[in-house]
Amino acid sequence: MLSRWTPASFGAMSVNTMSSVKPPRRDEPGVTIAQLREVGLFGALSDEFLDHLVATLTVQRVMPGDTIFREGDPAREMYVVLDGEMEVLKRSRRGRETRVAILGPNDSFGEMSIIDMQPRSATVRALGAARLLKISTEEMDALYRHDLKSYSLIVLNLARDLSRRLRVTDGLLADITANVLEEYVQTPAGKR
């Protein structure tokens, strides 16, 4: 099952001052194998490997308005939404933040920076209370050393999800370009 990545409105947003992420509470309940089975990123993995993930990965609770990371921040981890919703914000050249997606349960985010080792490409903020599964670059390296076959499945699932997102983005870009060109052609030359 692929995760759902929903493009949101492309209108400008006013953004309040963002708070920082709260550290996970010590009594934070973990994730279960059943929950991991619902996440496209972990598709086709064995129960043994999922059990290993349950034992090693961190669950982090966030509150409404918490910023998980900001565009331009250095990246060392990716996340999976266990419950709740996140908004993805992209800053324009003029400094205006625009919501480009809303992520919900079983969606992953932050993986681009894990792959290309570049700063964060967008800001992600909690729309409400949520629980996130955090996967650091060190944990990905440990998964690679623990079970190469399962690690390869995770990377394949990640590539499939990124490919699907790129297709959605390509479609949106084509629609926007067509609309702009249509408006340009319909506008009299003296009013352009």
Image (cartoon, rainbow, N blue to C red):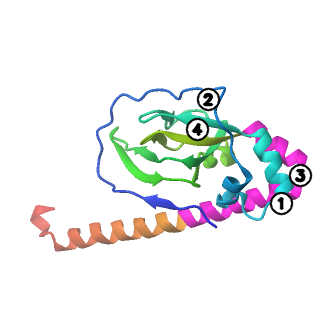
The mark that comes first in sequence, 4 or 1, is 1
Q: Which residue is mark 2?
A: 24
Label 4 to label 1: alpha-carbon separation: 32 Å
Secondary structure found at label 1: loop
Q: Looking at the rendered structure, which numbered label has been put on residue 147? A: 3
Mark in the foreground, 4 or 2: 2
Name the residue rendered at 36%, 47% in the picture.
98
Secondary structure found at label 3: loop
Q: Position of residue 60 (x, y in %)?
A: 61, 35
Q: Position of residue 37 (x, y in %)?
A: 70, 59
The mark that comes first in sequence, 4 or 2, is 2
Q: Looking at the rendered structure, which numbered label has been put on residue 119? A: 4
Q: Which residue is mark 1?
A: 46
**Residue type, mark 2 in image:** Pro
Q: Does the magenta run of residues contain 148? A: yes
Range of the magenta residues?
136-165
**Residue type, mark 1 in image:** Ser
The mark that comes first in sequence, 3 or 1, is 1
Name the residue rendered at 15%, 69% in the picture.
187
